[in-house]
Image (cartoon, helix red, strand yellow):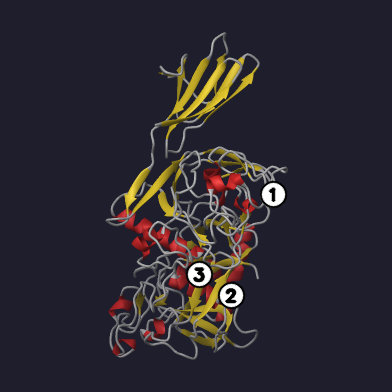
Amino acid sequence: MHTYKTTFGLLAVVLAAAMVQAAAPTINCKTDGDDLIVTYTGTLYQSSDAVNWTEVASASSPYQVKMGNKKLFFCAKGESKNFTISLSDTVDLNMIWIEPGTFIMGSPEDELGRYDNEVQHEVTLTKGYWLGKYEVTQAQYKAVMGKNPSYFRLGDDWPVDMVSWDDAMDFCAKLTTIEKEVGRVPEGYGYTLPTEAQWEYACRAGTTTALNSGKDLSSVNKCSEMDEVGWYGYNSDDMSQRVGQKQPNAWGLYDMHGNLWEWCLDWYDWNYPTSAVVDPMGPDTGVKHIIRGGSLDTSANVCRSAYRVIPLQDKGNLGGFRVALAPVPPSKDMTIPLSETVDLDMIWIKSGTFMMGSPEDELGRDAEKEIQHQVTLTKAYWLGKYEVTQAQYEAIMGTNPSKFKGADLPVEMVSWSDAKEFCKKLTEIEKEAGRLPEGYEYTLPTEAQWEYACRAGTTTAFNNGTNIPSADQRSSEPCPNLDEVGWYKYNSNKTTHPAGQKQPNAWGLYDMHGNVSEWCLDVYWSTYPSTPVTDPTGADSGSYMVVRGGLWAGSASGCRSASRSSCMFYDQLNSIGFRVALAPVK
């Protein structure tokens, strides 16, 4: 079955044909004197009777034709790239293909219910992507994550709620892993949340009106136009509703207006650009991520295609999400040349929230030093892929103080002050070379940045997702789980080892456990706060600095992600080195 969009020129008719539920080929026309200009995606067909069609084999968009004295019909057709994957024996996930294109993002100044943060600007999305036909349901979430956190009416076909941005991203990451294992993920793509631009482009499906039905609002509160396409404060009975009951948009997407808010990938920024942009992804850092689409308790104007806001809380019963299968953004990791033969590899660490410290049942924990508390890092940063090696240190400082000699061995016998001086010189060199990102400097990671990067999303003792299995393995026996990721007293042969020989963590960082301990930026404080904190930097003053990661002569307990120690800022030991960070200037 096909749907048709008809536009009449002076003596021409343009039709857009697409499969129901498919991402429709687009077609538009305009006249320029005696010429008809047809802009389209897909394959262009021409007809004189709108029944018998012939492909315009040589056509490319925009296609220009002289208008004669008879009607012409043009039709854009395309094969559906939509697909369905099986999440379990009874649960499927339907994905709709979204063609790349250009649209006007934001709202016109005369749109009823408009807000000032919706400045119109041209956006071009250069790569196509898939978007979930529906908001992720409770059955789909449970099939992937093994649980259902929802607060509202429970049901397989109801959208999952009570999910944070991190929860939604965890779902996407796990789904990517599952689908890669069975070979169903296209090269260069991954499951993720849609960017704000991808969300609005797909929501609009070619419309420029307040709603994707092609209609504007007759009222900012209750209106019949909203009733057609979504569940909101005047028809939802204050409950989420089964997905797919309202009218879909032209590309086959349901519930883009109302029902539950939908997380987007981007950090929120009040200010849109005023000029044309290509493949925008929002700011690099922020405090909150964007939610879109309105929800079951909002007024009609909040459900508009252009409405954008941040949530009042990270996890609530009005928040859900829609999964995208989109091109994986290019890596922000980078390699810095320190000399003709020596490089420094830096891994991009996104901002985020995590639980710092150790749970009460973790074997080997120090209860007084490792109180669990929530930490939010609002700014992204880079961290060295490896501990700074002797070759790297010598390339910048001109000396090698290490006891255990070797170009690829981690540098040791460096004080906290020595490590800071290395960072200072490196900042000066890179600034002079024009490679230093604006607002950033080379420094030591804060203790929170270090543990966040070490864990790479894990909550276990080690960043390979494992714990210390028995009391004896804390110190008096070898710990095979630690053997996978770090050098310590039972496998180091009483020496350091070349960087990068053990298994890296999920973010590509090596030797976060063992080998040499690593200086952090913070002055040591013996007791953590018990309440959530943002961008912590340690104690205000003191001579003892934080040391993290354990060491080649240490126990398994001392190498845990949460284990913490301290040394005087001037101490130089053969068990302490450092890892450099490229972080926002404080």
The numbered mark at residue 420 is 2
Residue 249: give x, y in percent of width and height: 50, 41
Q: Distance between the residues labelled 2 and 3?
A: 15 Å
The span from disc 2 to disc 1 (Cα, nearest Å) is 50 Å
Residue 554 versus residue 89 in the image, above or below: below
Amino acid type at image mark 3: Glu
Q: For the residue marked with disc 2, what is the amino acid?
A: Lys
Label 2: few (<14), some (14–19) or many (≥20) C-alpha neighbours in 10 Å? many
- In percent of width and height, residue 271 lies at 68, 53
Q: Is residue 342 left or right of residue 420?
A: left
Circle nearer the viewer, 1 or 3: 1
Task: Place residue 210 in its image quadrant.
Answer: top right
Indicate which disc residue 114 carries: 1
Residue 319 at what x, y percent from top left? Answer: 52, 62
**Residue 207 located left or right of residue 92:** right
Whether residue 542 appears in this view of the structure is: yes
| In the image, residue 314 above or below residue 56 | below
Q: In which quarter of the image is residue 483?
A: bottom left
Q: What's the distance in space between the residues labelled 1 and 3, CA to CA? A: 59 Å
Q: Earlier in the sequence, mark 2 or mark 3?
A: 3
Residue 338 visible at all: no
Q: Nearer the viewer, residue 73 or 423?
A: 73
The circle on residue 394 is: 3
Instruction: Kindly report which numbered mark, 2 or 3, lies closer to the viewer in this rendering.
Output: 2
Q: Quadrant of the C terminus?
A: bottom right
Task: Pick the residue in front: 577 or 440.
Answer: 440
How many C-alpha atoms fall within 10 Å of the one at disc 3: few (<14), some, or many (≥20)? some
